[in-house]
């Protein structure tokens, strides 16, 4: 029986890099070539040969001269019924058939209803307001929050994280933007501390005082990278991204906010 030595850390790192490169290339090729072909097939998009046949048939149909009888044309024209619609989201399809869109779930309502209509409904419906922004304040606070959203064109998701981070201050009497540079600086400081801790752990694994198996080193690398991602994502969402949202919206240009 032959005996094979365990792979070295460099070999394992090369395998991981090659595996990641293969996954990226396979995903791109699948999205660009294979997935698009299946989508076209499922949608019934005709092939080039079939398109040429359809074009030739349509061309021959319209180029063939036909007798023009105005009297027969007017006699065969049906009288179109007059349709009057009073609702904003309904239409009379034909005679006694009426179509009215009624969403069967809140997710569908949020998906196809316009933002202006959602704002109008959220003012009178605290449950809808809570589903959109994550809290249900009194009517006066709801009006102020929606006014802020309209003024700076914020999304519902951005309003949620602005409130979580404290940059959107909600009290019993008012709702207002309260940007604080202290929150922004604290976010970067916490992210720097987490990065330094993870870097020291990686250094400790890469240069051990005792011999460590290669698979344990790789497991340590993956664990530390996962831990850094798990800590950096909420710090970015809670401290850094809301500040950049306010900066892009122009909410910081009106005045210089203090560091408190």
Image (cartoon, rainbow, N blue to C red):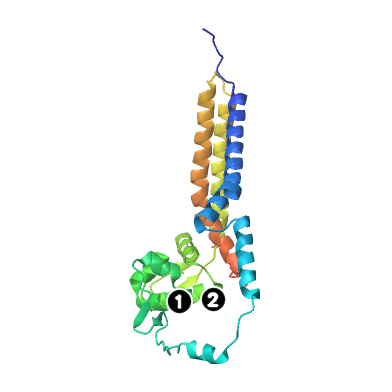
Left or right: 15, with 81 as reference point = right
Farthest residue, direction front: 67
Position of residue 20 measured from the top left corner of the image (x, y, whole percent): 58, 37
- Tell me the SS state at disc 1: helix
Q: Does residue 231 lie above or below 167 as drawn?
A: above
Between 94 and 238, the one nearer to me in the picture: 94
Q: Quadrant of residue 206?
A: top right
- Who's the residue at 41% across and 67% down the image? 132
Q: Does residue 29 lie above or below 114 as drawn?
A: above
Position of residue 90 measured from the top left corner of the image (x, y, whole percent): 40, 80
Q: Does residue 99 lie above or below 247 as drawn?
A: below
Tell me which numbered mark, 1 or 2, is placed earlier along the sequence.
Answer: 1
Circle 1 sits on which residue? 144
Circle 2 sits on which residue? 151
Image quadrant holding the C terminus, namely bottom right
- Who's the residue at 59% across and 69% down the image? 249
Farthest residue, direction bottom: 71
Left or right: 169, with 245 as reference point = left
Q: Does residue 128 lie above or below 165 as drawn?
A: below
Q: Quadrant of residue 207?
A: top right
- Who's the residue at 44% across and 77% down the image? 117
């Amino acid at each position: 029986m032959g005996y094979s030595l365990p792979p070295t850390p460099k070999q394992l790192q090369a395998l991981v890099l090659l595996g990641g490169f293969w996954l990226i290339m396979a995903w791109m090729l699948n999205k660009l070539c294979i997935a698009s072909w299946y989508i076209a097939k499922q949608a019934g998009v005709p092939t080039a040969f079939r398109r040429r046949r359809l074009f030739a048939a349509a061309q021959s149909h319209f180029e063939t001269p036909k007798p023009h009888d105005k009297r027969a044309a007017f006699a065969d024209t049906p009288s179109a019924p007059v349709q009057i619609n009073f609702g904003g989201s309904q239409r009379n399809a034909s005679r006694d058939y009426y179509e009215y869109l009624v969403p069967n779930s809140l997710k569908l309502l949020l998906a196809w209803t316009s933002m202006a209509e959602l704002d109008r409904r959220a003012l009178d419906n605290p449950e809808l307001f809570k589903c959109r922004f994550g809290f249900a304040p009194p009517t006066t606070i709801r009006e102020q929050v929606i006014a802020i959203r309209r003024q700076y064109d914020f999304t519902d998701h951005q309003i949620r994280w602005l409130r979580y981070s404290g940059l959107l201050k909600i009290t019993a009497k008012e709702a207002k933007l309260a940007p604080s540079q202290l929150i922004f600086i604290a976010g970067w400081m916490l992210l720097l501390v987490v990065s330094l801790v993870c870097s020291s752990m990686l250094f400790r694994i890469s240069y051990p005082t005792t011999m460590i198996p290669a698979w344990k080193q790789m497991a340590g690398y993956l664990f530390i990278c996962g831990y850094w991602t798990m800590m950096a994502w909420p710090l970015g969402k809670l401290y850094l991204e809301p500040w950049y949202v306010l900066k892009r919206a122009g909410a910081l240009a009106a005045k210089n906010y203090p560091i408190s």
